[in-house]
Structures are given as C-alpha cells and as structure tokens.
Image (tube, rainbow, N blue to C red):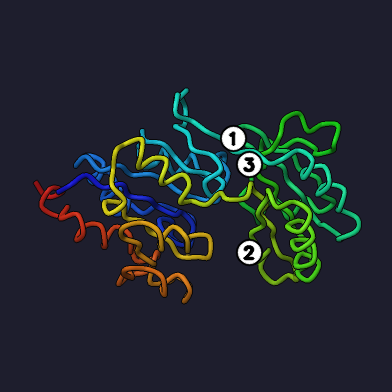
Amino acid sequence: MTRKLIALDLDGTTLNSASQISAQTRQVLQAASAAGHIVTIATGRPYGVSVQYYDTLGLTTPMINFNGALVHIPHQRWAGEYERRLPMQAVDEILAMRDRYHIQLVAAEGKNMMFVDTDKPELMDTLPMSVAENRVLTPATLSAVPTSLMVVIPTQAGVNMAQEIMNDFPSVNVNTWGGPENSDLSVLEIIHAGIEKTTGIDYLARYYHIANDDIIAFGDEFNDLHMLNHVGWGVAMANGSAAVKAVANDITPLTNDQNGVADYLTSYLHLAAQMNA
C-alpha cells in the first residue's frame, strides 16, 4: 500500500473518555508505523499535556500542537520545527481586558512555557494545561511571545470579547469551546490567524512528499472540521458532532470508547495480517 500520512486528533478520537490510549489503539498505531506510514498527533492541546500520548505510542515523527501553530519532534532538535506566535500587541491588549470582561483565567502558552493569571486555581484542574510548570502571568513576567492564549470567561462575555478581538486584530483567530462542566463559562483559544490543524498537516505532507490523496485524518469536533474537509480522506468518529460527520468522507462504526480509530485503520490499512504474522 502507498505510504499514508495518518493525522490523529486526541480528545474524543484517539483517547477514550478516560483520556487514555487503549492497548488495542496503541498496537494498531504502532503496526501502522512499522508498515511505513507516518503517524502524527494533531491536537489543540499544548505540548506539555500531549507528549505523554506521543511517548505511549512510541512515535518518532513530528507532532502538531496548538491546532497547527506548533510543529515539532518532541525530545530533540529538528531543523523543520516551526512555531507561529501571536502578535505581542494583541497579547498585551487581551491581557488588559481581564477586569472589563470578568475573565476567570487567562493562560499564555508556548512549546516550553506556561504563565497563568487566575483567582480560581481550581479551574486549572479542568483544562488541558501544563499545571506543574506554570508561572504567574503578568505583563512583567511574560518573558516570551506566546503561541496561544487560553481565556476562561462567562459565556456571553466571551462572545463579546471574541468579537472585539477579531475586529481589532485581524491577525489573530479566536476559537470557542465549552468550559468546565456544569458552569456558565466558556473557553476562548486565541492563536495566529490562518492557522489550522491543516496548516501543520500540509507542512508534514510536503516534508514527507505525501500527496493529499494519501492523507487520512480522524477527528470529532469543531477544530477538526477544516482538517477532515481538506485531506484526501477525512474520517469522523461515531461519537463526533453532526457538523464533523457532515464534512467527512466516512464515519467510524465504533466510538472512541470502542477503539474506533484502531478498528477503522485495521481495515483501511489491511493491518490484521501484519499484526498476526
């Protein structure tokens, strides 16, 4: 079979509802790598809370973090690495909005940085953040330009803030997703405009000389829409949103809790014979 680039969302896709990679999923993805396919994680998560899954799978290929704003190979220097950071003027003005919009938490993140400003530290336990490595965020302590800002905010205020940010700074993009369970909070993810998971996937396809028709991607939510619609074969999870299923080429018969990715790839790549050999 022609070598494939296999792009994997994490939450709700490769990970089960306990945020774990099952033994079956690990076995199938390692078999795909052994067969010569390029397996890459493509996630909105920061590096610090996704590298453990990279290591569990035993990958040596590049990983895509921050929804495409960072492409790198963990644990080593790679000449092809890139990190698209936010404009610092936008960062400064967004941080200044905290009181006006009643922001509960704001985190500035990069590959090896995490700064947090919050009066409610318990929120950090509900979000994909590198909590153990965080430092207090102030304009004075922010020592480097971040790749991403994460803002936890009351839902209606978040709608208004997102609109103001995009009006004032066309160079940034704001994604919104649900906040902590049973709360009236939402999360804004702010990254450089024009960045999608597809940005990183296309970059790796060029690097490995893989045609778009030979890219297969798996996802379940809004930040996977562009990826699934763009690649040669986009696969929505059975547990995915209706919008994701509508743009996908196919849907897994099984959910993320039923090893949907592993089941689909075993058939798609004809891996069963190789794993039983």
- Choose between 140 and 49: the one closer to the eye: 140
Give the residue furthest to the right. Answer: 99
Distance Cα–Cα, label 1 vs label 3: 10 Å
Is 273 left or right of 118, judged from the image as shown? left
The residue that mark 3 highlights is 130
Q: Secondary structure at mark 1?
A: loop
Residue 76 higher or lower than 41, as above or below: above
Residue at the (82%, 31%) spot, across then down = 141
Q: Which residue is denoted by mark 2 in the rendering?
A: 177
Would residue 156 be found to the left or right of residue 30 on screen? right
Res 257 quadrant in image: bottom left
**Spot occupied by residue 265 in the image (x, y as percentages of width and height):** 25, 57
Circle number at residue 111: 1
Q: Which amino acid type is shown beneath numbered disc 2?
A: Trp
Rendered residue at 35%/64% (across/down)? 235
Secondary-structure class at tag 3 = loop
In space, the residues marked 3 and 2 are separated at their CA atoms by 19 Å
